[in-house]
Amino acid sequence: MNIRNIILSSIFLAASASATFADPFCINLCCARVVNSRTGLVGRECLPVLPGPAGLICPRRTVCCKYTAPFGTAGSVCRPGFF
């Protein structure tokens, strides 16, 4: 797991939903709910959204995210995808 995934996993709470997205909100990241087996902490592991034959897809992912920069601070906003 790279440093970006570790940071994202430790910052965001988990959510569950469908794994296929065709929504402009889901243009940057798709994330999976993860539970650290050693500590029991719940977080997210995020990867870039992939192009697919029917639009953008998030294989084996449960939420989609987009980068935001509120007040000049980079971060991500995530929501379940209902598609």
Image (cartoon, rainbow, N blue to C red):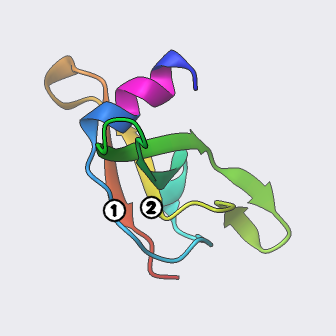
Quadrant position of residue 39: top left
Q: Is residue 36 above or below residue 7?
A: below
Q: In which quarter of the view is residue 20 placed?
A: bottom right
Q: Magenta segment range?
A: 4-8
Quarter holding residue 19? bottom right
Let me know if residue 5 is in the magenta part. Answer: yes
At a point 45% along the width and 72% down the height, the residue shown is 81
Q: Where's residue 36, x and y in %?
A: 40, 41
Q: Nearer the viewer, residue 69 or 14?
A: 14
* Left or right, residue 48 beside residue 72: right
Q: Is residue 30 visible?
A: yes
Seen from the viewer's position, the closer of residues 60 and 36 is 36
Q: In the figure, is residue 45 to the left or right of 51?
A: left
**Type of amino acid under label 1:** Arg
Per the picture, the main secondary structure of the magenta-coloured stretch is helix
Magenta stretch: residue 26 in it? Answer: no
Marks 2 and 1, how far apart at CA: 6 Å
Percent x, y for residue 70?
Answer: 19, 31
Location of mark 2 (residue): 63
Mark 2 or mark 1, which has the lower sequence index? 2
- Left or right of 1 in this view: 76: left
Q: Which residue does the image show at 86% across and 69% down from the upper left?
A: 53
Circle 1 residue: 79
Q: What residue appears at the point 68 percent right and 63 percent down from the top-left corner?
A: 57
Q: Can you say whether 11 is above or below 12 in the image?
A: above
Q: Nearer the viewer, residue 43 or 78?
A: 43
